[in-house]
Image (spheres, helix red, strand yellow):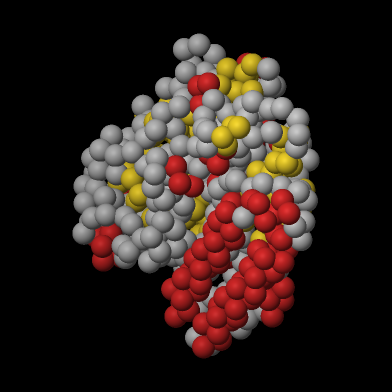
């Protein structure tokens, strides 16, 4: 939550029967529903045990602009209210999907049903919610850009079969309402155990990828060359939830997917700074109360895990066997261009974007590789198929520049920034801080691709409409330390030492 952009194209079918899952974060997202034209040709596909004859399978989508990413200037006094309203936008999109999924017959009879009965009312609800956001901001003394009112309208589009790279694939379509799974969890001609991806094109044999790792910036004489490693485990105690206290404080299931948590042990939607200080930690350094959390990885092998019938889990298309990393390395590193200042208490950083399929790749920061290949190949838009004996690796390099004032921002991005990739220098007005890096290693049997389909796929948890694309990987962090640990980390790095 890399840096190029590409957006996906998406579909509408006239005579159709809908079924699928979708939600959105920050009031924006795509609602995907599988549509089958009622036909008279024979088919072996079934729907909840009933034979369905289908001549063609198409996907319908409602695309809603992402309101949350546009709100860059929200007064502190209004942020809780705005976060609640953004959650309401999410709920409205969810309800619109449910309407799509439960009105199959009406849609088959009336080509205008989706527009008149779903998209139109959704626009009205979103307009009212955006207006409440305006009121919250103006009541707190802030200014509201009236152009945001135009974000109320959602659109319907048709999706063509596309290639990997952040765009919708025909293989990502849902079938059978997510209830029936094919061999090894792969449904028919579609993607994923729940029918919302991944698909074969989302994977690549890493041994066939040309080296793409770029060199690091040259160090200056003022570089901070040390490292500080904190050992916090791999979440073997299974501390999970589907909240996200950074983007959706006070909202249960605000993430709509499951997170692994290491470090602070009392992080949920209702935790605050005082809670963080009381939270205890899984870290060996008891002064590190920071929270490190990321979406889980699952193997889609037909397994139903503990959350198969829960929000954020199977009810939202996140299915399969949850994997625990075999290694989780958390390390702070310095700047090649300057000394670093200590991280402020309660600094919040999100790196990557859980919604790249909707938002494009501008904020993508996913890095997938395999042991033995990390210095040669890093992937953003595809998952690697690793050779025998090699493990899957996810890595994250967080923003390393801070504005010197704020521990968060309205869109959770503008208070931090990435250093220039060529020079390592922070933008004007920003200070270098210890850069948080994370390396998560997984023992995964390589997926296989046969006849254009992937079997025993693995994927990161995400919002259903994001189709479990590799680019949606992201990581979250809240800095919480005591007894001067933040200063010790900075001093260690500035002295060029390797500390733990």
Q: Residue at x 49, y 47 (%)?
A: 316
Question: Residue 186 appears in which quarter of the rendering?
Answer: top right
Please state the horizontal and vertical placement of residue 50, each as a whole percent of the image: 56, 35
For residue 236, side relative to residue 458 (left or right): left
Question: Residue 190 appears in which quarter of the rendering?
Answer: top right
Residue in the foreground of this view, choosing between 323 and 311:
311
Please state the horizontal and vertical placement of residue 261, each as a whole percent of the image: 34, 45
Q: Residue at x 64, y 35 (%)?
A: 52
Q: Residue at x 70, y 54 (%)?
A: 107
Q: Compared with residue 459, is residue 335 higher up or lower down, i.e. above or below?
A: below
For residue 4, side relative to residue 103 (left or right): right
Residue in the foreground of this view, choosing between 72 and 499:
72
Please state the horizontal and vertical placement of residue 422, each as a whole percent of the image: 66, 43
Please state the horizontal and vertical placement of residue 324, each as a whole percent of the image: 36, 31
Instruction: Name the residue at the front extreme.
Output: 40
Q: Compared with residue 241, is residue 132 higher up or lower down, i.e. above or below?
A: below
Residue in the foreground of this view, choosing between 493 and 286:
286
User: Can see residue 91?
Assistant: yes
Q: Compared with residue 33, is residue 200 higher up or lower down, i.e. above or below?
A: above
């Amino acid at each position: 939550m890399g840096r190029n952009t590409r957006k996906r194209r998406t579909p509408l079918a006239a005579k159709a029967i809908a079924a699928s899952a979708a939600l959105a974060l920050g009031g924006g997202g795509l609602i995907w529903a599988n549509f089958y034209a009622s036909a008279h040709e024979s088919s072996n596909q079934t729907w909840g045990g009933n034979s369905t004859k289908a001549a063609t399978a198409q996907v319908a989508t409602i695309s809603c602009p992402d309101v949350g990413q546009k709100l860059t200037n929200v007064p502190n006094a209004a942020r809780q209210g705005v976060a609640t309203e953004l959650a309401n936008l999410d709920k409205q999109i969810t309800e619109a999907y449910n309407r799509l999924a439960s009105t199959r017959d009406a849609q088959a009879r009336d080509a205008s049903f989706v527009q008149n009965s779903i998209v139109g009312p959704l626009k009205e609800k979103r307009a009212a919610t955006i207006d409440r956001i305006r009121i919250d901001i103006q009541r707190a003394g802030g200014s509201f850009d009236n152009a945001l009112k135009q974000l109320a309208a959602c659109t319907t589009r048709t999706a063509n079969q596309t290639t990997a790279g952040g765009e919708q694939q025909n293989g990502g379509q849902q079938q059978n309402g997510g209830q029936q799974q094919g061999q090894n969890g792969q449904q028919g001609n579609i993607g994923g155990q729940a029918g919302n991806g991944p698909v074969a094109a989302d994977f690549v044999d890493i041994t066939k990828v040309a080296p793409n790792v770029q060199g690091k910036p040259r160090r200056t004489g003022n570089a901070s060359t040390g490292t500080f490693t904190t050992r916090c485990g791999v979440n073997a105690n299974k501390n999970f939830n589907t909240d996200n206290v950074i983007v959706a404080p006070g909202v249960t299931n605000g993430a709509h997917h499951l997170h692994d948590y290491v470090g602070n042990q009392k992080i949920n939607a209702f935790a605050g700074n005082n809670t963080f200080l009381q939270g205890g930690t899984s870290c060996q350094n008891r002064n590190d109360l920071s929270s490190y959390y990321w979406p889980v990885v699952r193997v889609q092998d037909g397994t139903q895990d503990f959350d198969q019938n829960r929000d954020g889990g199977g009810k939202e298309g996140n299915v399969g066997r949850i994997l625990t990393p075999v290694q989780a390395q958390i390390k702070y590193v310095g700047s090649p261009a300057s000394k670093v200042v200590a991280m402020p208490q309660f600094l919040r950083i999100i790196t990557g974007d859980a919604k790249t399929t909707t938002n494009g790749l501008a904020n993508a920061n996913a890095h997938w590789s395999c042991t033995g290949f990390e210095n040669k190949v890093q992937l953003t838009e595809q998952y690697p198929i690793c050779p025998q004996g090699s493990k899957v690796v996810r890595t994250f390099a967080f923003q390393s520049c801070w504005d010197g004032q704020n521990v968060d921002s309205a869109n959770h991005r503008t208070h931090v920034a990435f250093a220039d990739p060529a020079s390592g220098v922070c933008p004007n007005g920003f200070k270098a801080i210890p850069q948080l890096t994370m390396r998560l290693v997984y023992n995964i049997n390589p997926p296989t691709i046969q006849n254009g389909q992937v079997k025993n796929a693995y994927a990161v948890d995400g919002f259903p409409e994001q189709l479990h694309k590799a680019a949606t990987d992201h990581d979250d962090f809240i800095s919480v330390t005591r007894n001067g640990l933040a200063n010790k980390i900075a001093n260690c790095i500035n002295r060029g030492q390797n500390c733990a």
